[in-house]
Amino acid sequence: MLRERGGDRARRGLRRLGRLRESGVHARHPDHARHPAHGDHRGHRHALGRRHRRGVPPDRPGGPAEPARPRRGAPARLGARRAAHRALAPLLRHPVHPGRVLLPEGRRRLAPRDARAAALSRAAGAGRRSAAVTFVTLGLSYGVWYSYSVFLVALLREFGWSRSLLAGAFSVFVLVHGAAAPALGWLADRIGPRRLFVAGAAILALGLGLAGAVERPWHLYAAFGVVSAIGVACAGWVPAVVLVQRWFPTRVGAALGLTSAGIGVGILLVVPATQALVEWLGWRWAFRLAALAVLAWTVPMTLAVVRDPPGGPAGAGARLGGVTPREALGTPAFWLVCAASFLGSLGTQMLLVHQVAYLVDHGISALAAASVVSLVGLASIVGKTGGGWLSDTIGRRVTYTLGMACVVASVGVLGLLARTPGPLPAYAYGALVGVGYSVTAPLLPALVSDLFRGRHFGTIVGIVQVANSVGGAAGPWLGGRVFDLTGSYRDALLVAVATSVAATGALWLSARPGGQPPGGGRIAS
């Protein structure tokens, strides 16, 4: 009750004080401190009032006092001032929260700074929800990608086609996926990733449905290699990178690591589910059910939850215009990053596509080999999440080196498996390659963001993705070709080791002085 009564008095005092200010009178705080030059303002104020009442003006330094000229209404104004101070006393005892404005009716509204904070909080929530849905969308899209190692074995058994022919369909898939990347980056910069996700889900579902009706090799190349690849590209990596980089410009590595961990979840869940469906219903129905799952999740959840980042490109580089694609193409750092992307993708994709066939050839059952692929997915969740955070902490290139060291170690374990077959080396391989390849996946887009951030980021990262896709296409085809010629994967494994080492060297060379583009961000080490 006392608080409410004090609030009423405070509001009346505020209204009275407002009227006084409109008339030119400014009240002082009742507990105003002494000023060294003027003494006690409160005592000076009362003395001033007494002199006015007697008609005596205040003393003026340097001369005698002039005759008093009474000011009209001065006592009334002083009385109103005291009344305002008395009315404001409850407000001083029970202050209003500084972030809110007290209205005469007692209602509260947000001050401008709190309104901005609330808007930022809502935007951050929208960014987190968009990243969460993108996490699952990437899991479905790239779960289809990595499930091809299961489909390869099923198609090999049914049609008897050569491994290089079947791996060639995947190579076309990766090439088309990469060739679409620059255009998709450009579109993501202009229309936003959200529309691309919806269109990509529809195209991917169509391609997978057509893949379930394959009868000849060119059917597989057209349905899976072209149509499905365009769908994965639209609902996949480049739009997701643009979305995450714009929502979280200050922690690109960690945010990309968390979001891209959805790919690991896709490997963990989609690949064994595909293997089970192939054994239960056949590979045709496995393709069709995958199409249904992609369509049922991506379209409604993207439309309902995903939001494009507000205000277009984020970050300092975007406000200044950033680096143009032409400027990026003129820097040594860009081409060295492209070389690292090409070489790293060649080695890792060679391993990931042929891993099931390699394990089955060395005495591991198809179901156990699929469980090894699931372990690759589980390890990649740890690698992507931890690698993104680690790259923000110790540097992109150091983290990339650690990841490629794990890839080289996994090849050594495969060599051990060829001599002493058993489940333990197979699972050790899955853990090492899962961590190694996944650590490197979010680092190159994060490094591109460091070097070339701005409103053209999507286009530039799309161009880098072309190099990644060319390497990803060449690796599986080369592995299959080597096997067809030699009857063994031994030489292919040596190529994987060599390309991993070369990719690491190229990335370190991109940090040399003079490689930074004009207007780019800092080069993370």
Image (cartoon, helix red, strand yellow):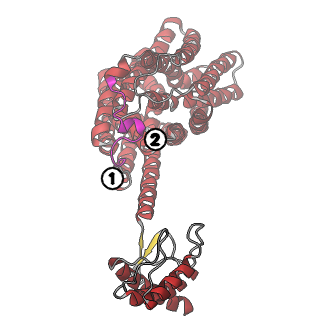
120 is higher (above) or lower (below) than 511: below
Q: Secondary structure at mark 2?
A: loop
Residue nearest the viewer, comparing 409 with 79: 79
Q: Position of residue 457 (x, y in %)?
A: 37, 32
Q: Position of residue 484 (x, y in %)?
A: 48, 10
Quadrant of residue 490 within the rendered picture = top right
Q: Which contiguous range is marked in magenta? A: 308-325
Quadrant of residue 283 within the rendered picture = top left
105 is higher (above) or lower (below) than 426: below
Q: Secondary structure at mark 1?
A: helix
Identify which residue is drawn at 43% across, 22% down: 468
497 is higher (above) or lower (below) than 10: above
Q: Nearer the viewer, mark 1 or mark 2?
A: 2
Q: Earlier in the sequence, mark 1 or mark 2?
A: 2
Identify which residue is drawn at 45% across, 23% down: 156
Quadrant of residue 378 within the rendered picture = top right
Question: Dot 1, crowdedness within 10 Å: few (<14), some or many (≥20)?
Answer: few
Residue 211 in view in this figure: no
Residue type for callout 2: Pro
Query: Magenta span: helix, strand or loop, mainly?
Result: loop
Residue nearest the viewer, comparing 14 with 189: 14
Question: Dot 2, crowdedness within 10 Å: few (<14), some or many (≥20)?
Answer: some
The image quadrant where one finds the N terminus is bottom right
Whether tag 1 and tag 2 are in contact, CB under 8 A, the answer is: no
- Name the disc covering residue 249, or none: 2
Q: Judge left or right: residue 378 versus residue 101.
A: right
Identify which residue is drawn at 55% across, 11% down: 495
- Separation of marks 1 and 2 at Cα, in angstroms: 24 Å
Circle 1 is placed at which residue position? 303
